[in-house]
Image: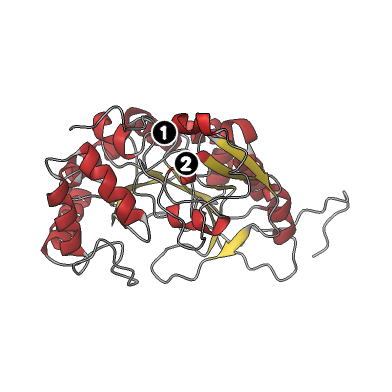
Amino acid sequence: MSTDPLNYHNGRGAQINPANRFLAASKGDDFDDIDPEDEPELKTKFIEVFPKTIVNRVTSPDIGMYYSLNPYQGCEHGCTYCYARPTHEYWGYSAGTDFERFIMVKKNAPQLLEEALRKKNWHVEAISLSGNTDCYQPCERTYGITRQLLEILLKYKHPVGIITKNALICRDADILQELARLNLVVVNISLTSLREELRRKLEPRTASSRKKLDTIELLSKAGVPVNVMLAPVIPALNDDEIFSIAKAVAERGALSMHYQIVRLNGPNGEIFTDWVNKNYPDRAAKVLNQLREMHDGKLNDSRFGVRMKGEGNYALNIRRQMDLARKRFLPQIPFPKLRRDLFEVPDDSGQMRLF
């Protein structure tokens, strides 16, 4: 691995800030008040916002979720490959370093969730926290919005799924255990590599691999069903870890493991290409060529059903390894189906609820 320390931003995934495709100038509402002398330090700024809605209906046919809810826009974790980066452009920012340092905090998310659940026409299906950006990114320790959301979901006995790569989720083990007792929660832990050198470069502000394994064990022992997402699989970088990761997570109590091939949608192709050339110049060409091999000659394939699994010989090899790894290491236990029949709107007036 070789990087130029004079041109590399330690603690950041993206090393460039490509132009916003939708604006003549890539500046968000709060960009101009940043002191230019602070620019090299790439300080993180938190911007409180108040959206009108918070629960989104997911219509993509190859994503296993019905609703998504994201209390934060942008993500401190700085995962180089993050498929959510392009969504930052709709807020007036770049998908590059802006995505990691301008974080929108949706302060009224708990209020909006409760308003949605109380609507007479509410359709009960699992809500996925972190369908876009991580609900347990570091600023959650300060704002606590995700914990408030979980408290509301428990209050209404509403099913929820969580996707995270931060050990901060352990803080809420008490609520998650109560939800699990009612069969109302599943947790997906994203684990990309057991090699810390690679993990720090790919996703610099996430929990360490050891802490992620500890998190899987803690939640599993608390009765919370855990699925592990080996996401993304990147050829010539972490595709050799499929068996070692499967073995490690099985030993910690995970019930299942799934995977996704890296998606370099929108400006992510430019961001990732820059990153891999700076960090792994000896194998950058191999990484990019194998990705193109799996995506019909391109770095990204937007076709539903193909975009996250790829096709061709490399994709087939990864799929066969995953099938074998699951068969060898993971228990043949059906993953629980979340209950929807327990949902009820509490009578906050203190009167008995009428049926």
| 10 Å crowding of disc 2: few (<14), some (14-19), many (20+) | many
5 lies left or right of 341: left
Which corner quadrant of the image does residue 269 belong to? bottom left
Q: Nearer the viewer, mark 2 or mark 1?
A: 2
For the residue pair 124 and 39, the one nearer the viewer reads as 39
Quarter of the rendering containing residue 311? bottom left
Q: Nearer the viewer, residue 72 or 245?
A: 72
Place of residue 282 in the rendered image (x, y in percent of width and height, measured from the top left): 11, 40
Task: Give the camera-side residue of 346 and 25.
Answer: 25
Depth check, front residue: 4 or 203:
4
Any part of residue 331 in sight: no
Say which element carries label 1. loop
Q: Which residue is tagged 2?
A: 100
The residue sitting at 39% across, 55% down in the picture is: 83
Kind of residue indicated by mark 2: Glu
Q: Which residue is mark 1?
A: 205
Query: Label 2, label 1: how many angstroms apart (C-alpha)?
Result: 10 Å
Q: Is residue 285 left or right of residue 274?
A: left
| Tally of numbered discs | 2
Q: Quadrant of the N terminus?
A: top left
Q: Mark 1: few, some, or many residues within 10 Å (few <14, many ≥20)?
A: many
Which residue occupies 43% across, 54% down?
A: 19
- Identified by mark 1, the residue type is Arg
- Checking the image for residue 260, the label placed there is none
Left or right of 129: which side holds 79? left
Assign a secondary structure to mark 2.
helix
